[in-house]
Amino acid sequence: MKTLVTILLSFLFLISNPQQNKYEQAMMNALENLNQAKTGDDFLNAANTFERISLNEKNEWLPLYYAAFSYIVITYALPNNSQKGTYLEKAQNFLDKAFKIEPDESELYALQAFLYPAGITVDPIARGAEYMGKMNKALEKAIKLNPNNPRSYYLRAITTLNMPQQFGGGATAAKPIFEQAKEKFDKFQPATAISPNWGKAQNEEELKKLLANK
């Protein structure tokens, strides 16, 4: 009887929310492709898919978020700085649109912080100090809006790890931040099946390296 009731309720939800169900299914399919992406072309295809979804779902910030994420990831594998700049401009454009929909979303500020280091690689001398300051402000905002968002701590840890020791960086300084991020990841539950949920495996891999080199 309980199973029958559950099936009926699910059916009623589907027929009463066909547009929402169509959106979520499109997002799930796009996320599956994103999770399997390995090459720059794969991520470019993912970005294009999320952009198409965003054009149909103008009040949803998640398609814009994932389009921006895909473009940012592409830049870390590109040797051509001018091409990096083009993709980062696209990523920032999607982020700006997402901020207009959800101006107080922690995940958007964390993703903004993820974008800035990629921007530094385009022109380290001209952008280094400015973008590091912007990244730190974005992370502070992300943590303030949601102290339990693990991606903010992971990004702070990886940045600290790659920062020169004379500026407060290095493995010793980064390790406790990776550990803090791990605690956050272990407790984190995404709000929905299509909400951001990346970073845990990367954080654990970095922490494993630090522990091995202790």
Image (cartoon, rainbow, N blue to C red):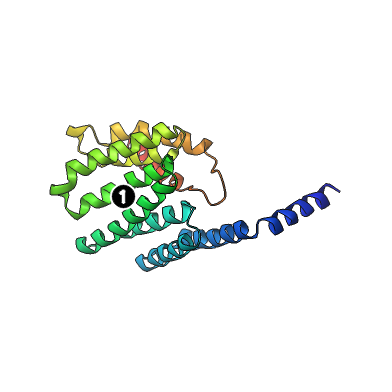
Q: Residue at x 46, y 62 (%)?
A: 55
Q: Examine the rendering and report whether any part of residue 179 can be seen.
A: no
Q: Please give left or right for residue 17 compared with residue 203 in the image.
A: right
Residue 81 in percent (x, y) is at: 20, 60
Front residue of this view, candidates 77 and 113: 113
Can you say whether 15 is above or below 144 in the image?
Answer: below
Q: Residue at x 39, y 37 (%)?
A: 142
Give the structural element (helix, strand or loop) at label 1. helix
Residue 193 in percent (x, y) is at: 57, 50
Rendered image quadrant of residue 209: top left
Q: Amino acid at mark 1?
A: Leu
Residue 131 in percent (x, y) is at: 22, 44
Which residue is tagged 1? Answer: 115
Q: Examine the rendering and report whether any part of residue 100 can be seen.
A: yes
Q: Please give left or right for residue 115 compared with residue 22 in the image.
A: left
Residue 206 in percent (x, y) is at: 37, 43
Q: Residue at x 39, y 47 (%)?
A: 99
Q: Residues within 10 Å of mark 1 (few under 14, many from 20)?
A: many
Q: Please give left or right for residue 173 compared with residue 25 in the image.
A: left
Front residue of this view, candidates 121 and 67: 67
Q: Quadrant of the C terminus?
A: top left
Can you say whether 52 is above or below 170 in the image?
Answer: below
Q: Residue at x 36, y 35 (%)?
A: 141
* Number of residue marks: 1
